[in-house]
Image (cartoon, grey):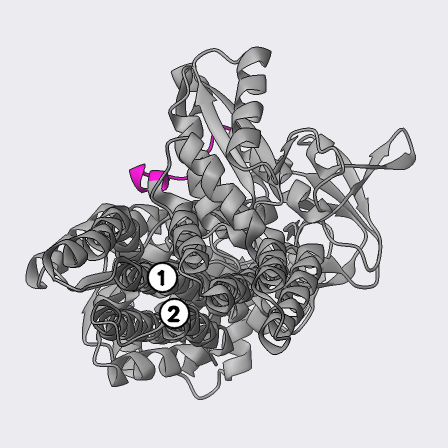
């Protein structure tokens, strides 16, 4: 994509970017620069990606200095060449990502990317002190500030000493906020929460309320610290998924192996994976056999056996043998890289509720400041005997109460937590907007093969029509007839027979296209095929009632019996449909398989509707028909796993891919990826979405309710600065703790 348009892409790593409003500020600032055509900051990954028409070193220098000016605490590193300052993980993520971009594969960030990462706080930048070391420093500052404040209140010193003690406390606790407010004013960003905090606290000093001035800052910083810790916790639960990423590959060249970065391995190179190592890239085993643990990708607890000729995916962990693998995909295209990219971009697709907050904050702050000014100036001029200091104090209280911190912090945090909770259960949600959409699901549409069924054919029934021919004998005849065929059905018959086949017994093998096979086994003429073959040869046969693919067998012109091969339904599928039915969802199955098979599976699972014999474009048509039936607010979820499901996944309101072993294209097109290959996780995802939404709305209603009450009390002079502080910080902390409950989801 980047190459096609002639635009150059550059990615930078922002070390120490710990708050979403800083991310937003940087994004807005860089967007406005000359020469930049697009820019987005990913808050989870701590990266900035920008596009330009002509990349030059001067522009890069300008970008870096602009970031430095906007957020002095952020270190800017070039993510394509990590320089050791950020965490290794951050580099790796940057690395994986820059790789994706070189391949020109870009997820559709849409325009909402512009507002993307910001909402964690339109105003909140302070959690940037709270990396691991920052939290400790902040805690020390808060303790020192609290001790000084207590001293100021308890020592009945003279006025000047008292003022000095409180001022010292104020500078320790809130100096950086005042500084930030001044810097922002110089840059023309007046109305942000630093401004609100500074005006209110300095004003409190102005009207002689020293302890309150310090307390406002103290509590504000405590709230910020909580937010920082909470954000880091959600980040960690998402980063736990990131441990999939391999650190190195053992490249085999000229009989020796050397360690290289996975990015440096090319398609066709040979790599060696020793016991206990992660498979770094997708490929095919060309030597060795081993058990591999696939749980990181599939959630399957039983290790799988890998031998020559089998395909391995990056992220598998080799258990016991040594495997030599021929690489089939470059790192940027490998399974792990794709998955990482999906998770990392999850935070950049915004839920509607989150966008609402950004817009809200934009208009809310200036309105509040104007109302506060009027409150300070108008009554003393109009009401006789009203003291200026009284009304100024009320106006300041009004300002402190009105700070929208709680809303601005807890909403994105709620969604972020929801995405984290989902990824703990093996469900990757690619954006909070999809998490939000899952609440309104009316129809859940499933593909059959590989989604509800295992996608593996198995002999499920053998029926002999002659007493002298046993079932084993019938199966043996079929296995010999299918000896040369590569069809999955032939393979399943040979697997069911399970004994060595002796080629010497076969002669005159003839495949009759669209009908079946004619062959002589031990000199006897055997036919194995479909009903058309029996009709063509004029052999009367039985039509079984069970669903599945039927192979009819005749020997020397007389009917011998039939074998039924069908796809097994996943154990988990029954639970999946039951759970969705309980939630009142309509379940629909679409399949390319025959009507008989489709309907049998649909019946056994209890689906509401089954549509069979569909090609990929017909599946899209079925989705569109459902789309016409539902109300505009209701959503359709499609769950699929194959390449042929890609168009449908993209067309549905929410596309869910079976990610453990689904095709790359399906995983790419989907909005939600189920890593464990269990269809029942669809119901789990809807449950997490519902729980997330209810927590987010509890926070919105709670925060606005408390605000309204205290604003009235403040304006009428009933609430003091203490209540003001509690109303803001208390609400923020309660809202953050409430949002953290999402992570505990079972």
What range is drawn magenta here?
103-114
Q: Residue at x 48, y 36 (%)?
A: 183
Tell me which numbered mark, 2 or 1, is placed earlier along the sequence: 1
Q: Residue at x 43, y 71 (%)?
A: 739
Secondary structure at badge 1 equals helix
Percent x, y for residue 584?
Answer: 21, 81
In this rendering, position of residue 619 left or right of residue 458:
left
Q: Nearer the viewer, residue 649 or 610?
A: 649
The residue positioned farthest toward the bottom in the image shown: 467
Majority SS type along the magenta span: loop
Secondary structure at badge 2 equals helix
Q: Residue at x 39, y 27 (%)?
A: 31
Residue assigned mark 1 = 400
Q: Nearer the viewer, residue 158 or 476?
A: 158
Quarter of the image with the N terminus is: top left
Q: Residue at x 69, y 30 (%)?
A: 266
Report the label total.
2
- Select label 2 or label 1 by which is in front: 2
Asked whether the residues under the numbered discs 2 and 1 touch, taking CB atoms below 8 Å apart as contact, a structural biologist would say: yes
Residue assigned mark 2 = 721
Which quadrant holds residue 542? bottom left
Percent x, y for residue 207?
Answer: 40, 60
Q: Nearer the viewer, residue 373 or 121?
A: 373
Q: Nearer the viewer, residue 135 or 23?
A: 135
């Amino acid at each position: 994509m980047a190459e096609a348009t002639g635009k150059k892409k550059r990615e930078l790593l922002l070390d120490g970017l710990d708050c979403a409003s800083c991310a937003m500020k940087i994004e807005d600032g860089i967007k406005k620069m000359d020469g930049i055509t697009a820019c987005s900051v990913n808050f989870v990954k701590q990266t900035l990606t920008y596009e330009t028409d002509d990349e030059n070193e001067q522009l890069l220098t300008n970008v870096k200095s602009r970031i430095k000016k906007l957020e002095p605490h952020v270190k800017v590193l070039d993510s394509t060449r990590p320089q050791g300052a950020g965490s290794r993980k951050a580099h790796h993520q940057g690395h994986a990502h820059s790789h994706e971009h070189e391949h020109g594969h870009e997820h559709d960030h849409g325009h909402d990317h512009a507002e993307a990462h910001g909402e964690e706080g339109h105003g909140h930048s302070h959690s940037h002190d709270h990396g691991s070391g920052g939290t400790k420093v902040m805690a020390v500052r808060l303790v020192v500030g609290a001790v000084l404040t207590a001293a100021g209140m308890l020592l009945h010193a003279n006025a000047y000493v008292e003022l000095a003690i409180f001022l010292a406390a104020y500078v320790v606790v809130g100096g950086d906020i005042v500084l930030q407010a001044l810097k922002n004013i110089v840059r023309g960003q007046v109305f942000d929460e630093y401004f609100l905090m500074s005006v209110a606290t300095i004003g409190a000093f102005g009207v002689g309320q020293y302890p309150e001035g310090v307390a406002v800052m103290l509590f504000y910083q405590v709230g910020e610290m909580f937010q920082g810790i909470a954000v880091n916790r959600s980040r960690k639960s998402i980063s736990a998924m990131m441990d999939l990423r391999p650190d190195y590959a053992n490249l085999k060249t000229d009989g020796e192996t050397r360690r290289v970065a996975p990015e440096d391995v090319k398609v066709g190179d040979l790599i060696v994976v020793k016991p206990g190592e992660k498979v770094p890239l997708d490929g095919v085993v060309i030597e060795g056999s081993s058990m591999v643990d696939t749980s990181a990708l599939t959630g399957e607890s039983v290790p799988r056996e890998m031998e020559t000729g089998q395909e391995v995916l990056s992220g598998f962990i080799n258990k016991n043998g040594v495997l030599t693998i021929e690489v089939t995909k470059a790192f940027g295209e490998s399974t792990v890289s794709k998955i990482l990219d999906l998770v990392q971009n999850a935070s950049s697709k915004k839920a509607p509720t989150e966008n609402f907050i950004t817009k809200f904050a934009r208009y809310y702050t200036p309105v509040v400041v104007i109302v506060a000014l009027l409150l300070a100036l108008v009554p003393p001029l109009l009401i006789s005997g009203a003291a200026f200091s009284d009304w100024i104090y009320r106006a300041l209280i009004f300002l402190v109460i009105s700070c929208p911190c709680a809303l601005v912090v807890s909403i994105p945090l709620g969604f972020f937590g929801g995405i984290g909770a989902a990824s703990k259960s093996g469900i990757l949600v690619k954006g909070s907007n999809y998490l939000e959409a899952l609440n309104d699901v009316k129809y859940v549409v499933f593909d059959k093969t590989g989604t509800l069924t295992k996608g593996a054919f198995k002999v499920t029934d053998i029926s002999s029509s002659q007493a002298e021919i046993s079932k084993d004998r019938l199966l043996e005849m079929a296995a010999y007839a299918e000896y040369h065929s590569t069809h999955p059905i032939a393979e399943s018959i040979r697997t069911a027979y399970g004994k060595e086949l002796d080629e010497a017994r076969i002669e005159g093998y003839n495949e009759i296209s669209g009908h079946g096979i004619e062959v002589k086994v031990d000199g006897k003429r055997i036919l194995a095929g479909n009903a058309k073959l029996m009709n063509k040869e004029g052999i009367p046969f039985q039509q079984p009632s069970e669903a599945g693919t039927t192979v009819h067998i005749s020997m020397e012109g007389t009917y011998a019996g039939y074998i039924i091969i069908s796809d097994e339904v996943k154990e988990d599928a029954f639970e999946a449909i039951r759970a969705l039915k309980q939630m009142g969802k309509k379940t629909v199955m679409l399949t390319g398989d025959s009507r008989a098979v489709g309907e049998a599976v649909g019946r056994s699972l209890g689906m509401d509707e089954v549509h069979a014999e569909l090609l990929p474009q017909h599946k899209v048509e079925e989705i569109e028909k459902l789309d016409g039936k539902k109300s505009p607010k209701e959503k359709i979820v499609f769950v699929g796993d194959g390449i042929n499901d890609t168009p449908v996944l993209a067309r549905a309101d929410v596309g869910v891919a079976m990610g453990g072993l689904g095709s790359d294209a399906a995983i790419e097109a989907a909005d939600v990826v189920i890593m464990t290959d269990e269809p029942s996780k669809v119901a789990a995802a809807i449950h997490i979405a519902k729980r997330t939404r209810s927590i987010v709305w509890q926070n919105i209603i709670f925060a606005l309710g408390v605000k309204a009450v205290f604003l009235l009390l403040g304006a009428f002079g009933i609430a003091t600065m203490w209540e003001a502080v509690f109303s803001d910080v208390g609400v923020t902390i309660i809202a953050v703790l409430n949002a953290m409950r999402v992570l505990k989801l079972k």
